[in-house]
């Protein structure tokens, strides 16, 4: 260890002392602060350091440091960024989480600082920059500006001088389209001062007089676009079991034994290899130089393993482990997070000071002031039922607020909020001694009530001892008493030979009052012994006809008033005897079994933590949780189920466009999350759990967002909502009109005659050579029906002949629409009016897409009609459920598909050593046996087929079948 004091880089002086983002660019191997006007601009030839400072609810600053490496940056600059990141971390107390960010493969957390996106720019500091006024506007596609960049699977933005175009590939998902609109809004404000037009171009829309025509002119005219070319970005790295390595003297050695927290020693550095991400864990008493060497060893390890450049490297310090790191362990013991974190900060600060590093802001905290949380509006209608057997018995008005620990209850509170006419709060309350039969019956009856109210209530499950403030505040007061009244509870204690301690007005009972305000005024019956008294609280003691209120010397006036209220609630009209601490009578002590010593300390409250938002998915039946960083209301996408974890409550939020079957499993999914978080994050398994449906969010949920009620009420899917918010409500919706136009075009194509051909068409030459008109009609069909996400075909079959593919796709689309009419599927909106497309003859390649004969096409349409007639009735949730239908393009019927060859999962994986021939590589999953399909995906083929296309693709990527 050097005795000389290391000089802190001047660029890092005084940083990390306020919440926000700070950025440095590496120039001549030194970090140079970037002007705030340049934040969000990243040049491909440079390297950057980004410090993100946040403040936890406990008041302490939390740090994330990212070093971003442009694809054209030099190796020396990249190395400087990595080294300076370690130095910056050391100056902040050594507790920051460090992230290596490679251009094109940035982490979600990094991207969340620069919403909606970052757009890396050509050049760098070494090559010099052009000033904005020196640049002429350049038309940009943000990928190479060529037709070959376009495909049917992605969304593209074309930025021109006077208009920004969004091209929606036919197979792109709704959320991609919505995200692209956010990027367009950014470009409009950034490059056009908010004064340019925006146009949406849908794949297959060929009208030369619309925005679509303008778009294709920029590419030299319309022509078919090719399939997506798979690049490194599309390759999903193989998931491997986490492997722990120790790092010593720059060498990486595997650690034997089952992965557990106990293997991590605080004076060593470790590498945890998770395949797609590599973590460097450093003990809190390690040397700064060892930490630098560990990060370098991680980069060398990734290179030696020939991992893709997208592999992330994240460095964390002991005591500040991230959720993604801990999720690789089956169990992560957690004590008092607050105490260990504070202790860790002190030790880290002392160690780094010994090593000559100046430490800033290590012990920075602010006093924590308890805020009254948002509560439900008063004046509503309260109804409470007690569960006994298969029945629910309503409580009288006088008994509402009394809860027995051996019973279960259903609470329904109906109130009027300022935003909506009528809202509902529906909860089950489970006493800590209640039996499982009563708990299950309470859930069943509450679900029935939820459905009868058309799914509008906020539905909760509340456990005795974990009541949230908005629940407690409904009762004046809330009193939890011993024992139970249900027949099931009485039978249970009788069978077990247990004494019946159920509260009675004549019995000896001690009631603790510890609350100080309306949201925590819950009182609890405790054992009637003097040892449970507390100088900071009040108690009510009843013994026969005598009722005492006992005031501790440190209790508050509010507690004293609540004690009197509780006594009147339990024993109306009774005469109270006041017993102040130190003035108790012998009668008082006799009722408690004699005088004993007791405490005078406050009861410690739960640890206060920041809220976290997560998206959920399943991989081979295992729950996958991904955090949404720096979340906002815009992250609540209507096609998703999300979890909001505040540590004191858990909310499962359900979008309107979620599949009905998934909606029914919301509590089950949330419970799996709670079980996982309980083992890794110390979350209570009995944390209050709420189910919140989109459009019915209560105030105690919206308080975690900057909530806009007007935005929340916009109808439609994610793309439709975004179009409405950005462009208003006056834009037409693709649907019946476009389908009618396409069907009319089809009719004209197949039944054209001199009598039915307009003079305008004759002048334009459209009645010459019937194949061209049929091609236009088929293109119209493709345009009209391809964009509907609710009618995509799942059943895989080999691709048909190239010359008939466009025709087959159009006819298959017609089949989809005819079936979808029964389902009343709501198609997507588009700000571009739908008109019958016209194909530019000079750009249509008749060689690659040969025109079909009339006989062939008419026969195929007849087949489609037959398919439509036998199609089974589907559900009503158009965006979520997809009808099974014959895919004409693939040229194989369903019976043939059922008899197709079956291959093992290992054979079908994209990275399999043995290539299976004669299968549709885009639908590898279809060749799995039913049993292995369920093992791999955690669901049956039928359930998978009803998922939206984007979700199918996401699941296939995760299991290497895409």
Image: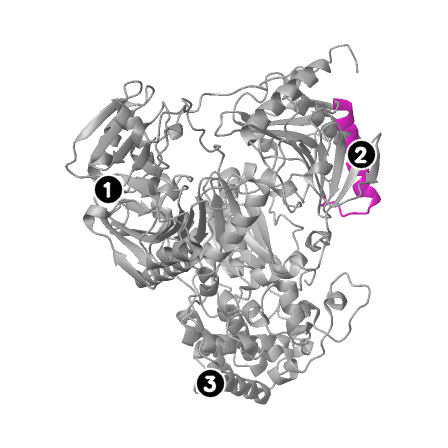
Q: Is residue 279 above or below residue 936?
A: above
Q: Which residues are magenta?
A: 288-311
Single out the mark in the foreground, 3 or 1.
1
Q: Which residue is mark 2?
A: 247
- Magenta includes 304? yes
Colour basis: one colour
**Residue 941: percent from the left, percent from the top?**
59, 71
- Looking at the image, the residue that sits furthest to the left is 573
- Magenta includes 195? no
Give the camera-side residue of 298 and 152.
298
Give the camera-side residue of 669 and 571.
571
Q: Is residue 304 above or below residue 455?
A: above
Neighbourhood count class around disc 2 (C-alpha, 10 Å): few under 14, some 14–19, many 20 upward: many
How far, Cα to Cα, is label 1 from label 2?
Answer: 69 Å
**Residue 40: percent from the left, percent from the top?**
58, 35
Q: Quadrant of the N terminus?
A: top right
**Mark 2 or mark 1, which is nearer the start of the sequence?**
2
Q: Which residue is mark 3?
A: 869
Residue at 64% in and 17% down: 359
Q: Which residue is mark 1?
A: 506
Neighbourhood count class around disc 1 (C-alpha, 10 Å): few under 14, some 14–19, many 20 upward: few
How far, Cα to Cα, is label 3 from label 2?
Answer: 67 Å
Instruction: Give the SS element for disc 1.
Output: loop
Is the C-beta separation of discs 1 and 2 under 8 Å? no
């Amino acid at each position: 260890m050097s005795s000389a004091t290391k000089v802190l880089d001047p660029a890092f002086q005084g940083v990390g002392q306020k919440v926000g983002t700070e950025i440095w660019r590496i120039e001549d191997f030194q970090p140079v602060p970037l002007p705030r006007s340049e934040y969000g601009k990243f040049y491909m030839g440079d390297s950057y350091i980004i410090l993100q400072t946040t403040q936890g609810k406990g008041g302490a600053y939390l740090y994330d440091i990212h070093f971003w490496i442009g694809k054209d940056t030099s190796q020396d600059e990249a190395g400087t960024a990595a080294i300076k990141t370690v130095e910056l971390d050391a100056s902040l107390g050594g507790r920051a989480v460090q992230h290596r960010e490679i251009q094109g493969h940035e982490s979600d957390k990094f991207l969340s600082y620069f919403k909606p996106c970052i757009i890396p720019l050509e050049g760098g500091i070494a090559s010099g920059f052009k000033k904005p006024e020196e640049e002429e506007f350049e038309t940009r596609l943000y990928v190479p500006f060529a037709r070959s960049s376009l495909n049917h699977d992605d969304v593209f933005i074309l930025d021109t001088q006077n208009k920004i175009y969004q091209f929606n590939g036919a197979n792109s998902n709704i959320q991609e389209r919505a995200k692209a609109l956010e990027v367009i809004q950014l470009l409009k404000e950034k490059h056009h001062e908010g004064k340019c037009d925006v146009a949406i171009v849908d794949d297959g829309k060929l009208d030369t007089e619309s925005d679509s025509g303008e778009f294709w002119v920029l590419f030299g005219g319309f022509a078919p676009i090719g399939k997506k070319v798979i690049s490194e970005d599309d390759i999903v790295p193989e998931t491997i079991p986490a492997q722990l390595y120790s790092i010593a003297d720059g060498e990486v050695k595997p650690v034997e034994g089952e992965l557990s927290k106990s293997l991590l020693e605080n004076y060593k550095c470790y590498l945890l290899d998770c395949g797609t991400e590599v973590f460097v864990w450093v003990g809190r008493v390690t040397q700064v130089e060892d930490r630098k060497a560990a990060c370098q060893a991680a980069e060398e390890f990734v290179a030696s393993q020939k991992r893709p450049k997208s592999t992330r490297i994240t460095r964390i310090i002991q005591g500040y482990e991230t959720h993604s790191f801990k999720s690789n362990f089956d169990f992560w013991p957690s004590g008092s997070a607050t105490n260990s974190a504070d202790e860790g900060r002190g030790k880290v600060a002392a160690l780094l000071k010994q090593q000559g590093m100046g430490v800033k802001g290590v012990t920075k905290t602010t006093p924590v002031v308890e805020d009254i949380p948002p509560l439900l509006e008063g004046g509503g209608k309260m109804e409470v039922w007690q569960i006994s057997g298969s029945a629910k018995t309503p409580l009288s008005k006088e008994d509402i607020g009394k809860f027995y620990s051996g019973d279960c209850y259903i609470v329904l509170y109906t109130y009027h909020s300022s935003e909506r006419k009528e809202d509902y709060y529906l909860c089950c309350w489970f006493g800590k001694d209640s039996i499982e039969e009563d708990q299950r019956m309470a859930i069943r009856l509450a679900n029935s009530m939820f459905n009868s109210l058309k799914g509008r209530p906020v539905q909760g499950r509340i456990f005795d001892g974990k009541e949230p403030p908005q629940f407690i505040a409904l009762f004046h007061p809330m009193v939890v008493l011993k024992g139970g009244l249900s027949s099931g509870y009485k039978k249970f204690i009788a069978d077990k030979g247990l004494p019946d301690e159920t509260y009675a007005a004549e019995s000896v009972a001690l009631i603790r009052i510890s609350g100080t305000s309306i949201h925590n005024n819950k009182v609890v019956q405790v054992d009637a012994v003097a040892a449970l008294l507390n100088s900071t609280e009040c108690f009510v003691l009843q013994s026969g006809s005598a009722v005492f209120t006992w005031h501790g010397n440190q209790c508050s006036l509010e507690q004293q008033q609540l004690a009197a209220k509780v006594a009147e609630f339990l024993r109306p009209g009774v005469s109270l005897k006041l017993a102040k601490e130190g003035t108790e009578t012998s009668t008082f002590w006799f009722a408690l079994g004699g005088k004993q010593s007791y405490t005078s300390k406050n009861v410690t409250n739960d640890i206060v933590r920041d809220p976290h938002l997560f998206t959920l998915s399943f991989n081979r039946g295992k729950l996958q949780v991904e955090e949404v960083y720096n979340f906002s209301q815009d992250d609540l996408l209507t096609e998703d189920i999300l979890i909001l974890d505040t540590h004191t409550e858990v909310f499962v939020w359900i979008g309107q466009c979620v599949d009905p079957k998934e909606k029914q499993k919301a509590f089950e999914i949330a419970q799996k999350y709670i079980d996982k978080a309980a083992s890794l994050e110390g979350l209570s398994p009995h944390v209050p759990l709420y189910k919140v449906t989109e459009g019915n969010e209560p105030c105690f949920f919206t308080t975690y967002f900057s909530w806009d009620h007007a935005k929340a009420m916009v109808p439609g899917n994610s793309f439709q909502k975004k179009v409405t918010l950005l462009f208003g409500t006056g834009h037409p919706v693709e649907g019946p009109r476009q389908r009618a136009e396409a069907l009319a075009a089809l009719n004209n194509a197949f039944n054209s005659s001199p009598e039915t051909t307009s003079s305008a068409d004759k002048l334009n030459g459209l009645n010459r050579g019937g194949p061209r008109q049929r091609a236009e009609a088929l293109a119209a069909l493709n345009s009209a029906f391809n964009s509907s996400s609710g009618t995509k075909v799942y059943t895989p079959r080999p691709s048909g002949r190239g010359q008939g593919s466009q025709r087959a796709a159009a006819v298959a689309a017609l089949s989809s629409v005819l079936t979808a009419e029964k389902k009343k599927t709501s198609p997507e909106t588009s700000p571009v009016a739908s008109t019958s497309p016209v194909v530019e003859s000079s750009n249509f390649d008749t060689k690659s897409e040969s025109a079909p004969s009339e006989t062939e096409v008419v026969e195929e349409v007849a087949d489609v009609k037959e398919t439509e007639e036998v199609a089974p009735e589907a559900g009503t949730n158009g965006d979520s459920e997809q009808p099974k239908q014959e895919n004409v393009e693939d040229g194989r019927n369903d019976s043939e598909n059922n008899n197709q060859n079956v291959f093992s999962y290992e054979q079908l994986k994209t990275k399999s050593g043995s290539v299976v021939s004669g299968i549709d590589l885009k639908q590898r999953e279809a060749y799995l046996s039913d049993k292995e399909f369920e093992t791999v995906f955690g669901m049956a083929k039928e359930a998978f087929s009803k998922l939206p296309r984007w979700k199918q693709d996401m699941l296939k990527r995760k299991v290497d079948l895409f």
